[in-house]
Image (spheres, rainbow, N blue to C red):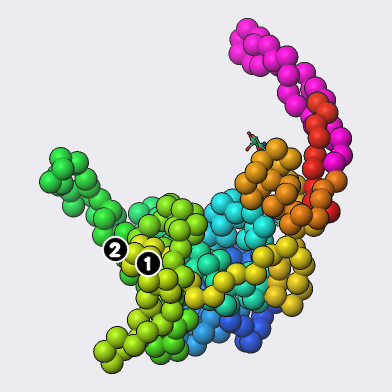
Amino acid sequence: MSPRWCLRSLRLLVFAVFSAAASNWLYLAKLSSVGSISEEETCEKLKGLIQRQVQMCKRNLEVMDSVRRGAQLAIEECQYQFRNRRWNCSTLDSLPVFGKVVTQGTREAAFVYAISSAGVAFAVTRACSSGELEKCGCDRTVHGVSPQGFQWSGCSDNIAYGVAFSQSFVDVRERSKGASSSRALMNLHNNEAGRKVGHALKEKFDGATEVEPRRVGSSRALVPRNAQFKPHTDEDLVYLEPSPDFCEQDVRSGVLGTRGRTCNKTSKAIDGCELLCCGRGFHTAQVELAERCSCKFHWCCFVKCRQCQRLVELHTCR
Ligand SMILES: *[C@@H]1O[C@H](CO)[C@@H](O)[C@H](O)[C@H]1NC(C)=O
Ligand SMILES: *[C@@H]1O[C@H](CO)[C@@H](O)[C@H](O)[C@H]1NC(C)=O
């Protein structure tokens, strides 16, 4: 019995709720692991997969835990990048994971699609490179020198595998709908942009292009709504519909509103109390913050600190 097989069969299968009526594979991020001895069952019961993703799951069970990890990375990164904005990428325990906003053609949806397809490509590549997956592996015998003089070796094939897996798994949703609807075109475009730009995505969010579908010959394409804008590239994000302002709670859409959010009194940007609180004003409270202070180095070798309390003002939106 190979150690890897053992490890895989030991993994616990902990699913909060099983449900067939689901619409989004990002729900995998809510699971603590994917993997079991009985693959048929595992894939059939996963929430949020469409039928063709279930089939891919059955054929590639060992990759599914990386897909789950990719979804988690995407959500963590989204929450970090948007921590100071009105829409802060918080997830719901129901489907769709980010609420209705990402089922519409908004800028936020563009970002979520891009970052999650990037997350899957990244996580699968990393699992390949660390030897967790049998289907790919780092071939250390492959090496060379690039035209720019960089020495490289190993795992460029793993990147190709990670990207290809993300393309098949993430994009299949849009392709199965028939890639002619505007939303499918938008999602496919943003999925691909995510796999290309990775870490620069947040800037792409701010510079995303509003587009509309137009007939080009016998097919449809997305073109900028404002003719004065330069055409978007493969690496730019595109969206079809303006976003709501995210100010007030709207339970049906999964929008939490900004009441209670911490804001910055002196900032004029979106994290400032004026914009973040949508003009409703804010509360100010004194809170004590515990900090390490008066640290001394002792021979040899440790550092001893005192605990100090510091009073700070905390502003929260009304
Ligand atoms: C996002 O904001 C809501 C309130 O609007 C808050 O409850 C939640 O904790 C925030 N989420 C993150 C990830 O910061
Ligand atoms: C608040 O905003 C000001 C001005 O942009 C900035 O200098 C300061 O670091 C911010 N404070 C916090 C706690 O982020």
Mark 2 vs 1, N-terminal side: 2
Residue appearing at x 49%, y 88% in the figure: 51
Q: Residue 160 bears which disc, if any?
A: 2
Q: Is residue 94 left or right of residue 210?
A: right
Residue 163 in sight: no
Amino acid type of the residue that numbered disc 2 sits on in the rendered structure: Ala
Work out whether 297 lies above or below 236.
Answer: above
Q: Neighbour class for label 1 at 10 Å: few (<14), some, many (≥20)? A: few
Region of the chain picked out in magenta, as a range: 284-309
State the CA–CA distance, disc 2 to disc 1.
36 Å
- In percent of width and height, residue 148 lies at 16, 43
Q: In this view, does 69 lie to the left or right of 156?
A: right
Amino acid type of the residue that numbered disc 1 sits on in the rendered structure: Gln
Farthest residue to the top: give it.
299
Q: Of circles 2 and 1, which is in front?
A: 1
Farthest residue to the bottom: give it.
218
- In percent of width and height, residue 4 lies at 44, 61
* Of 32 and 164, the residue lying toward us: 164
> Which secondary structure dominates the residues rendered in magenta?
strand
Q: Residue 153 bears which disc, if any?
A: none
Q: Quadrant of the C terminus?
A: bottom right
Q: Is residue 109 magenta?
A: no
Give the residue number, with chain letter if any, for mark 1: 228
